[in-house]
Amino acid sequence: MTPPILTAKDLRKKFGDFEAVKGISFSVLRGEIFSLLGPNGAGKTTTINMLSCLLPPTSGTAEIAGHAIPGDTLAVRRAIGVVPQEIALYDSLSARQNLEFWGRLYDMRGQELTQRIDEVLDQVGLADRAKDKVKTFSGGMKRRINIAAGLLHKPQLLFMDEPTVGIDPQSRRRILDMVRELRDGGMTVLYTTHYMEEAEELSDRVGIIDQGRLIALGTQAELTRVVGEQETLRLHLAEEAGVALAGVNGTAGAPATMSADGSVALFSGLPGVLRASAVDHQIVVNVADAGAALPAVVGRANTAGLHVRSVDIEQPNLEAVFLHLTGRGLRD
Amino acid sequence: MLNKLTAIIRKDTALRFEGRSELLFFLILPLIFTFLIGGGLPAAGGGGDNRLLVPVADEDGSPRSAALLAALADGDVVRPEAMSRAEAEALLADEDAAAALIIPAGFGAALSADGLAAGQEAAVTLLVSPTSNVAPAIEGEVNRAVSALARPLLVARNATEGVAAVRPFADETARAAFFAAALAAAEAEAAPPARVVTEVAAGGNAYDQRAQASAGQLITWVFIPLLGASGLFVYERLMGTLRRLLTTPTRKSTFLLGAIGSQYLAALAQMAILVLFGVLVMRVPWGRDPVALIVVLATFGLAGVALGTALGTFVKTEGQASNLSIMLGMAMALLGGAWWPMELFPAGLQQIVRVLPTTWAMSALTDITMRGQGVADILPEAGVLLAFAAAFFLVGLWRFRYE
């Protein structure tokens, strides 16, 4: 079995009375892309901050490439590269000046540094913009330089904290391809995201994190097994689901109500329906067989007076896993 | 560590001088202000004469009034310029002159033999501006000139009256002839009874506006950007680069040393340029004791950058840092005697401003340029500046937050 490059044991972080991370334990294997998937505020960035020695854990330990946290701060930092969520670059300096600065902080210099800067600029597709100031770049280009700065010293383990937030689809595609290339080149990547699609596309293994707890961990196949063979019917409504439900009539056995955790009772009792939840302008219905349950579900919605604009049928995915485990959608 | 320090210093320098406007504040404005305030331009209409302009309305037009004008012009304090009373009063009203002298008609006649014999009073009028603090100096200079003019006349008159009391003159012609002879003799002996020799203490120079301006402008223009170091820390925090920097194998102390070092080195370079400008263009005697000068500039720079570091822990935005550094820098330079000699401040204020590093720096710099003092003499000021630096650094390090 591939040895882990990172092992976290019961990591906790408290800010005053608020506990942002509540005892997280996991391992990242060498050469894999491991994603921490969870909604905003789940504790992903705090976890990364503890593992990159930016924040001391309130309790718990970790080990990265044989170096202990807390304890071997500088050795850990030498082994890792960090691509922060914000674009942490100097706008007034050129791409090359930025990379030269960050490279020197990793003790690189001279010909080795120059050569490596050329390589990573090539890798992120910005070799022709090396002399341009970062402030002249688009958001996607800045993201790519932001990543390049974390790659310069060829870290054993690269932390990428939501690296595609706020960029155009083309740049996102480029970054996702780059992450795979890095893994294929032998680098281990710990990737945090709240985009289920990214975690599904990239990850060898996924840890699902919510409200400071790691609630599931495994390969995508292992995780979807958690929700069984169930499929998902996604009913797209004309208005926000809670508002829509408040304006319609249910039946005695299936009232048009929504509980505090987002569960919807309207479809209770229908054959094959396992559960239903409201997410934004959608009602997500987990069913054993989508094809069999579809007529009854749509029929119940119409009878109640819900204006269903469209219906998607989805195979088991991480969204369904998250919904199954938390009763909420990833983007709640 | 050296590689990282160099990287941080190079980065900060590149960021600071990224825009051309920084050169304006780093170099161009300090040189211009030093030149102008140090008297680099000749006074208006004075042809390089920096004495105080005193418009004189000579309504008498006699040899005596001309002699009074000459006596005034002979001194080092005022530069009399003859003009009409209306012109003189206009200059005073416009605050282009601190005082105006009116020599009324009859002034010469009152100082003639007949006038003196008849006991006529010779008077001049000095109109002074209520807003000028140099009027007393002009008044003193006019009194000196009037006394110089009147003294031989009084001697001649007293001599003539004394002789007449013992042996009356045969007629007025004889009396006038005696008076003229006595006056000539008195004027020949007109040298003051005691000579005042002015010497500058301890081998220094006389007060020198160029030295005052060179030192004062150096302190002002170097101190403000040093306080601006506070903005650097805010910038790094807001941009997220400080957090990223702390995920690299770089110690916090290395970052702080680099960030502070870049500001300090820039300040040293700026001070070196301003000193060279002072020596080469303004002829300021900066080079009397180079070791003393280096000690003062080095400790002053440390105190400034330490204060900037401490301020950086109190401000939240770059705008706050910029405004605060300009406001504090200007106020501390002004109160430290960088703009005017400290002697012009009220005695109480002179004591209060000893809590400012600028006061000690200015004192040390004028010790070197004007008082001709050396390294041993400026050690107390340098020690106080170092103490300021230590105290500000302690506050800065205690309060510094990397998050």
Image: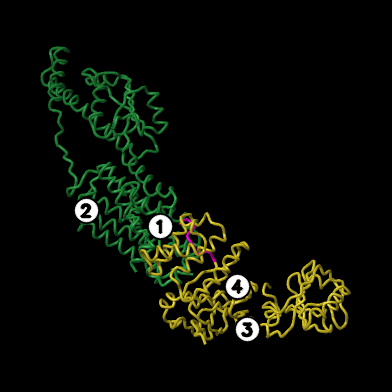
Chain colours: A yellow, B green
Q: Nearer the viewer, mark 2 or mark 4?
A: 4
Give the residue at mark 1: B227
Q: Which mark is residue B290?
A: 2
User: Is A92 included in the stretch rendered in magenta?
Assistant: yes
Label 1 in the same subunit as label 3: no
Q: CA distance from mark 4 to mark 3?
A: 15 Å
What is the magenta range? A86-93
A133 sits to left or right of B301:
right
Q: Position of residue B111 (x, y in %)?
A: 24, 21
SS type, badge 2: helix
Kind of residue sitting beneath label 4? Thr
Give the residue at mark 4: A193
* Residue A325 in the image: above or below residue B46: below
| Mark 2 neighbour density, 10 Å: few (under 14) some (14–19) many (20 or more) | few
Q: Earlier in the sequence, mark 1 or mark 2?
A: 1
Label 4 in the same subunit as label 1: no
Label 2 in the same subunit as label 4: no
Give the residue at mark 3: A216
* Residue A274 in the image: above or below residue B174: below
Q: Are marks 2 and 4 in contact (CB under 8 Å)?
A: no
